[in-house]
Image (cartoon, rainbow, N blue to C red):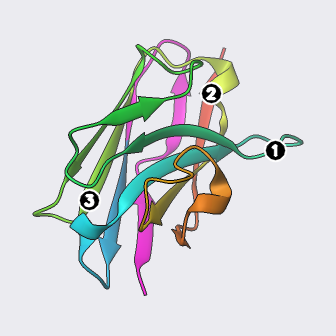
Amino acid sequence: QVQLVESGGGLVQAGGSLRLSCAASGRTFSSYVMGWFRQAPGKEREFVTGISYSGGRTYYADSVKGRFTLSRDNAKDTVYLQMNSLKPEDTAVYFCAASRSMRGLTTGSGYDYWGQGTQVTVSS
């Protein structure tokens, strides 16, 4: 069992920045691929970014490339999502997720554990 706790969400103006954190506990953190998804009101959950076990590879949705940066610190069992140049369309609940496999990295069904989510609101 892995517990995931997100933090760092909030209200920010367009063009601003936020850093989300996801702290994991329960099992060997480095054994899990980590991802972030988001869900806006009335919309389906969508993949935002993912990172490999060691952090050597990262993957981004086209909508956030060049603006978001995902990293992980396996010594601290934490992943960090740095979000810059935020836009109103980035407003959503952001969920951290953990998967034992790289397979299905960009699809929600590929993950084994989920956090409770943190709200990000970007005002225009």
Q: Residue at x 69, y 22 (%)?
A: 89
Residue marked by disc 1: 44
Residue that numbered label 2 is attached to: 90
Q: Give the distance between the C-alpha atoms of the residues marked 3 and 1, in whole angstroms.
A: 26 Å
Mark toward the viewer: 2 or 3: 3
Residue kind at label 1, given as amino acid type: Glu
Q: Residue 113's spot in the image, x, y percent? A: 52, 72
Q: Where is residue 82 in the image (x, y as percent from the top left)?
A: 34, 32
Residue 23 located left or right of residue 85: left
Between 60 and 42, the one lying in front of the other is: 60
> Residue 78: which numbered mark, if any?
3
Quarter of the image containing the C terminus? Answer: top right
Where is residue 122 drawn, in percent x and y?
A: 61, 26
Q: Are marks 3 and 1 in contact (CB under 8 Å)?
A: no
Magenta span of residues: 1-19
Query: Which one is earlier in the sequence, the residue at label 2 or at label 3?
Result: 3
Q: Which residue sits furthest right?
A: 42
Q: Where 70 falls versus 13 (above or below)? A: below
Between 62 and 40, the one lying in front of the other is 62
Tag 1: Cα neighbours inside 10 Å, few (<14), some, or many (≥20)?
few
